[in-house]
Image (cartoon, grey):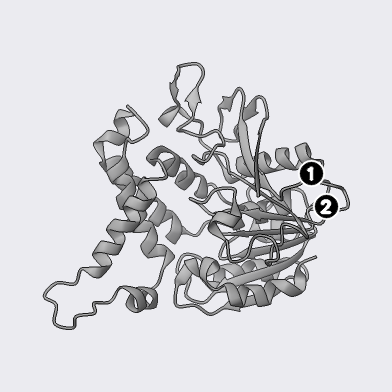
């Protein structure tokens, strides 16, 4: 996929504050958009980038489920991410330093407005197929309510219409880990809060997986070992892996944006807002997902007119949306345009 960027000019945030010239990075199929193209729009997860061939390679690319030759595939890097779109680690032209903790608070609706600016820039009048999981699912369901006549088909997977309190508790625990690192508040450079970020990632990873997933992959091979250590090494490795490619300030802001998600805010409540969605909708739950259990997704399926319901069986919890590709392909193939 090809990388692009646009400058949107002044961008006002829902919670207050503004950026004089917002940059939004996005990837598309490697050609110019034509009105005859069928548009597949992918909303990425929390720490991913806008190139789904990078983080969803089994499903995205020429000849694959999200065929970049057959469809005009689009993915936008969300506001606040460190992968090119303006965020806390970006340079503030007024100070000549990164924004860090002076960046405006972001909401899910701000992020969707950034995606709509890209849609308008490309000249796309209708999105034929929209899919999002996790925070990407927050984006997708919000967009389907924000522009109901634009989104034709939508898939909401491993997500919810309003952030569950259980996930907010996880988010706050991760922010506490960031803030416990004294270098985070110092705001001296982009590596501030690095050790806190590693800890936050470790906390998050537990929520993304399941008891069975850790049992299957991180159990001790030596039944007589004195101290279990394999899972310890795994958590340390995953924490460093994220800190090598991400920054603590972007992570703090993105985590906070999750807590803003409430489809029903200003729309008469969640159920009323879901009923305004016109897209042909498919809701996909994962049976072992502890942060978005099937009961959360049933709320969407039961209140969006004509919505179809599917359940993925997985030992790998929330991350099943990235791992259970065979089941997902079977669900999505019949509904792709």
Report which quarter residue 141 is drawn in.
bottom right
Answer yes or no: is residue 157 visible. yes
Q: Is residue 67 above or below residue 16?
A: below
Where does residue 318 sit, x and y in percent of width and height?
48, 67
Quadrant in which the C terminus is drawn: bottom right
In the rendered structure, are the residues bearing label 1 and label 2 in contact, judged by CB atoms less than 8 Å apart? no
Could you tell me which residue is drawn at 29 percent across and 29 percent down? Answer: 186
Between discs 1 and 2, the one toward the N terminus: 1
Q: How many marks?
A: 2
Task: Give the alpha-carbon distance from disc 1 to disc 2, as whole Å.
Answer: 24 Å
Report the side of 321 relative to 317 (left or right): right
> Crowdedness of circle 2 by 10 Å Cα count: few (<14), some, many (20+)?
some
Where does residue 137 sit, x and y in percent of width and height?
60, 58
Report the side of 20 relative to 244 (left or right): right
User: Which residue sits furthest right?
Assistant: 36
The residue nearer to you, when weighing 249 against 33, is 33
Look at mark 1 in the image and give the residue it sits on: 32
Q: Is residue 50 above or below residue 281?
A: above
The residue nearer to you, when weighing 296 against 285, is 285
Q: Secondary structure at mark 2?
A: loop
User: Which residue sits furthest bottom?
Assistant: 223
**Which callout, 1 or 2, points to the residue nearer the camera?**
1
Look at mark 2 in the image and give the residue it sits on: 149
Q: Secondary structure at mark 1?
A: loop
Report the side of 55 relative to 300 (left or right): left
> Crowdedness of circle 1 by 10 Å Cα count: few (<14), some, many (20+)?
few
Where does residue 88 sit, x and y in percent of width and height?
47, 33
Could you tell me which residue is drawn at 27 percent across and 68 percent down? Answer: 231
């Amino acid at each position: 996929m090809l990388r692009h960027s646009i400058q949107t000019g002044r961008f006002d945030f829902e919670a207050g504050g503004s950026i004089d010239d917002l940059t939004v990075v996005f990837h598309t199929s490697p050609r110019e958009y034509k009105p005859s193209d069928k548009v597949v729009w992918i909303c990425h997860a929390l720490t991913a980038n806008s190139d789904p061939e990078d983080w969803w390679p089994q499903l995205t690319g020429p000849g694959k489920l999200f065929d970049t030759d057959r469809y005009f595939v689009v993915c936008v890097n969300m506001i606040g991410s460190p992968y090119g779109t303006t965020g806390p680690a970006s340079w503030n032209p007024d100070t000549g330093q990164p924004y860090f903790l002076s960046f405006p608070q972001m909401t899910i609706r701000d992020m969707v407005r950034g995606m709509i600016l890209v849609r308008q820039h490309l000249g796309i009048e209708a999105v034929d197929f929209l899919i999002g999981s996790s925070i990407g699912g927050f984006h997708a369901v919000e967009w389907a309510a924000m522009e109901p006549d634009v989104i034709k088909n939508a898939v909401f997977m491993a997500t919810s219409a309003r952030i569950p309190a259980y996930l907010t508790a996880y988010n706050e625990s991760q922010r506490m880990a960031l803030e416990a690192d004294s270098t985070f508040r110092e705001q001296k450079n982009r590596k501030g809060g690095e050790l806190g970020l590693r800890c936050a990632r470790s906390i998050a990873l537990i929520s993304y997986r399941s008891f069975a997933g850790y049992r299957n992959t991180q159990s001790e091979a030596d039944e007589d070992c004195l101290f279990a250590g394999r899972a310890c090494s795994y958590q340390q490795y995953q924490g460093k892996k994220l800190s090598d490619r991400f920054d603590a300030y972007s992570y703090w802001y993105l985590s906070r944006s999750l807590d803003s998600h409430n489809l029903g805010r200003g729309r008469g409540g969640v159920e009323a807002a879901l009923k305004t969605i016109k897209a042909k909708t498919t809701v996909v739950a994962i049976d072992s997902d502890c942060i978005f259990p099937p009961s959360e997704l049933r709320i969407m399926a039961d209140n969006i007119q004509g919505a179809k319901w599917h359940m993925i069986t997985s030992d790998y919890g929330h991350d099943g949306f990235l791992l259970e590709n065979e089941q997902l392909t079977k669900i999505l193939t019949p509904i792709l345009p």
